[in-house]
């Protein structure tokens, strides 16, 4: 049984491309930062640039590398260059693939019609948590869209990281409704794609804290 007890919903700020955004997120109380190693994303970052940011972070902040159907050699290279803590898989990677690295992983699932979440959680039993995001055909994530939170079964079959279209306006309701282990946000705390907004980050994390 994985640790699920939440007395404080963790917050991950995803799509970091600048040191100042990483530091603003940490200053506001973010638990984790996400770096997108997916070249087609407007938030993509090169391993060297991510390494330079990560090198300057304080202790006790979890760094996460996001991948979409990347090959094993590239993921190993990112781990080596950045010393990232966790891997986050948004593509069609199976459990065996996800499990082969020297880092623990999170599997992201999109809430497409017919998804059997109980089954998927058994398939990805070694995943530290399951990230749930909105489904839009052809787009692997970061759509900024909200899905129907009532589709998430309770009790949660795995620790849930709720993502998809969360903003300062809806995150308190999301935390109250879903009671996730953690929240993941990208677009809702941006000025423009890949550029975060320190005021929005601060407000967002305050809203999560308020809802706990
Ligand atoms: O951010 C991207 O561009 C991206 C591209 C491909 C796969 C996943 C991607 N992002 C996922 C995330 O950043 C998180 O799941 C995020 O919380 C959801 O994004 P948003 O709805 O913008 O908050």
Image (cartoon, helix red, strand yellow):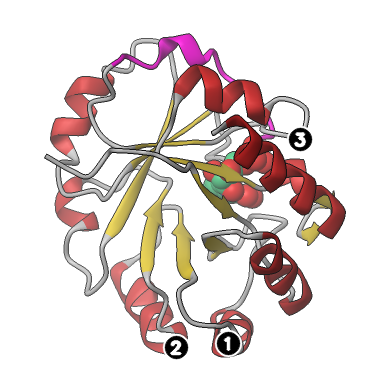
> In the rendered image, which residue does mark 1 sit on?
48
The quarter of the displayed image where residue 100 is located: bottom left
Query: Which one is closest to the eye, mark 1 or mark 3?
Result: 3
* Residue at the image point whose x is 24% and y is 56% from the top: 98
- Would you say the residues marked 1 and 2 are in contact, meaning their CB atoms lie under 8 Å apart? yes
Which residue is nearer to you in this view: 17 or 21?
Answer: 21
Q: Is residue 200 left or right of residue 99?
A: right
> In the rendered image, which residue does mark 2 sit on?
81
The Cα atoms of the two marked residues, 3 and 2, are separated by 34 Å
Q: Is residue 187 left or right of residue 73?
A: right
> In the rendered image, which residue does mark 3 sit on?
168
The quarter of the displayed image where residue 14 is located: bottom right
Q: Is residue 114 above or below residue 207?
A: above
Q: Is residue 135 left or right of residue 169?
A: left
Number of disc labels: 3
Indicate which disc residue 92 carries. none
Query: Taken as a whole, is the magenta stretch helix, strand or loop?
Result: loop
């Amino acid at each position: 049984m994985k640790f699920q007890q939440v007395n404080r919903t963790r917050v991950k700020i995803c799509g970091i491309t600048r040191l100042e955004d990483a530091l603003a997120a940490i200053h506001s109380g973010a638990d984790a930062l996400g770096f997108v190693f997916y070249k087609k994303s407007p938030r993509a970052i090169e391993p060297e640039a991510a390494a330079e940011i990560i090198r300057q972070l304080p202790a006790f902040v979890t760094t996460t590398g996001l991948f979409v159907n990347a090959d094993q050699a590239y993921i190993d290279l990112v781990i080596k260059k950045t010393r990232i803590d966790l891997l986050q898989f948004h593509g069609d990677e199976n459990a065996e693939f996800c499990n082969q690295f020297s880092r623990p992983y999170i599997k992201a699932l999109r809430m497409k019609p017919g998804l059997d979440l109980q089954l998927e959680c058994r398939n990805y039993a070694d995943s530290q948590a399951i990230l749930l995001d909105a489904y839009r055909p052809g787009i692997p994530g970061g759509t900024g869209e909200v899905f129907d939170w009532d589709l998430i079964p309770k009790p949660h079959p795995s620790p849930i990281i709720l993502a998809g279209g969360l903003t300062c306006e809806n995150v308190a309701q999301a935390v109250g409704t879903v009671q996730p282990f953690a929240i993941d946000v990208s677009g809702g705390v941006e000025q423009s794609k890949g550029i975060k907004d320190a005021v929005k980050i601060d407000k967002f994390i305050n809203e999560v804290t308020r809802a706990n």
